[in-house]
Image (cartoon, grey):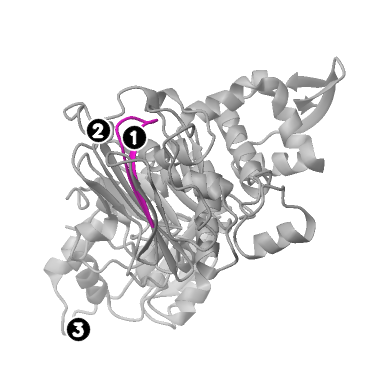
Amino acid sequence: MAESILFVVEGVNPEKHVLSSIGKQFFENKLIQVAYETEVYQLGKLLSADPYLDLFEVLKERSEKNRQLLEEFNRDDFSQIYLFFDYDGQAANASDTALDAMLVHFANETESESYT
Amino acid sequence: MLCKFEVKNFKNFGEPFVFDLLSTKNYEFNPECVQNGVVANSIIYGPNACGKTNLGHAVFDIRTHLTDDKITEHYETDYLHAAQREGSAKFVYTFQFGEDEVEYAYEKASVRKLLSEVLKINGKTVISLDRREGSVAEFDLDGTETLNRDLGSGLGDENSPLSAVKYVANSTVLTATPENSVFRKFVAFVKNMEHFTTETARAVQAAAGTVADIILGGGRKLAGFETFLHQAGVACSLSVVEVSGEKQIAFDFGDSQLDFVTNASTGTLSLTAQYIQLITLRLQCDFSARSETNGVEVVGDARKQAEDMGWFPRVRPFLFIDEFDAFYHHAAARYMVETLKKLDCQSILTTHNTSIMSNDLLRPDCYFIMSATDIKPAYAFTDKELRKAHNIEKMYRAGVFNG
């Protein structure tokens, strides 16, 4: 299978033009895009609570649509994963500390080490 | 299927060691790996020298007195645990055949010297003999009434007495009762269990001349073997050449050919040995075995009927491969596990390769972690409810399953 890259966006209706431009400008690989459908702080909370969860599988079990989109892939198939989320400073669980932790954790697109 | 195995005072297992293959977990992924609550595909991890190889020998001890196998050196020397040389080794096997359960317990002073045997079907003792108390066995299966119960004279010598279970299996006219059918399934299962060790792989590699005969035997096509290698990640083109009138497999480079066996890499030869093993699995169950009923080889309709009854499994019912992927690329190892999952065969593999420790392949109740004192499924080491999203390889490497 050719190298595939996973884009994770927040909403089901993302900024399509921006994402497609990024894809065209920076990547020649097959791009798969899935939505997490909740703000980034929820994702951070889930992954920090259990450091042994695979982000890929978390996304896959998130919705039936994601399950279908990722049907033919397994957790080792994506060489790079990029997250596109809003800052959402107004969210009830917004936290700059949590965001800092996520920025450290998600600093490398090719690996996701234990979340600490 | 084997659902539980206990051993004591054999090799490194000085204390009782229990390998429990029953699972009560209801994971929704990879359901085919557990059948009727028994783990059908398992992989054992554990540090060097914890006893993984000896566990294989222990499980296959049953064949040393129930079949006519040649007894290998592993059993002939240092059979009992080093600290308990005067005692006896104890084995208890529990099998499940559909709804029926068979328990076979025995004690031995050495690989050849059986001291006692008890066989139970659904909790009822059907065969028992304790040679420390005498040589008269107890049988309670329909058809055994006329059988000579004294196994003392002329049936094996003092140092390698005949097994009472083998005696009944080989000589009795068992009537067609549900209980006797379970007994036959048990005998057929043991007769067809297959142990694949690194010695077996080496033996296949040494038998260079016969590789082509086996791979191309029975009308099999070279393309099947070629496809197997391709799927395991070995890119090569093969052809058949004749050398001194004998067929040999060669790497095909268009204008020239290179002999396969002498030029294949260690990994490719290891895969070849495994391919031959898979052919064996699919096709070579012990059909030559005589029928338990009348000593006549079972053929035609009778054989089909026996197969339908489960007395003669179509494929090897049980396979234990030690260090199965020692020379494999991780993709080849994964492919082998996927292949075994598709076979109607209970498989137990040992390995150090953590890249195949994944919920994509098996489940947390199929990966066993072994130490010198016990063996438990991965999920038993954590209170966390494991689900498919968990990266169990990462958990293992981080020490979560260290007990």
Residue positioned 60% across, 27% down in the render: B204
The type of residue carrying mark 2 is Asn
- At x 58%, y 56%, the residue is B343
Q: Nearer the viewer, mark 1 or mark 3?
A: 1
**Amino acid type indicated by mark 1:** Asn
* Residue B252 placement, left or right of B335: right
Residue B108 colored in magenta in the image: yes
Q: Secondary structure at mark 3?
A: loop
Quadrant location of residue B83? top left
Q: Is residue B256 above or below residue A74?
A: above
The image position of residue B47, as x and y in percent, is 26, 36
For mark 2, what is the residue?
A: B12
Q: What is the magenta range?
A: B103-119
A93 or B190: nearer the viewer? B190
Decide: is B156 above or below A67.
Answer: above
Task: Provide the residue designation for mark 1.
Answer: B54
Residue B161 is left or right of residue B206, and the answer is left
Query: Within 10 angstroms of label 1, few (less than 14), some, or many (20 or more) residues?
Result: some
First-in-chain label (1 vs 2): 2
Where residue B8 appears, as percent x and y from the top left, is: 24, 41
Q: Quadrant of residue B120?
A: bottom left
Whether discs 1 and 2 lie on one chain: the answer is: yes
Q: What kind of element bears circle 1? A: helix
Q: At x 23% / y 71%, what residue is drawn? A: A46
Residue B243's image quarter? top right
Q: CA distance from mark 1 to mark 3?
A: 58 Å
- Please name whichever residue, B182 or B174, is drawn nearer the observer in this view of the structure: B174
Q: Is the residue A62 above or below the residue B260 in the image?
A: below
Work out whether disc 1 and disc 3 sit on a shared chain: no
- Residue of label 3: A91
**Mark 3 and mark 2 on one chain:** no
Q: Residues within 10 Å of mark 3 (few under 14, many from 20)?
A: few
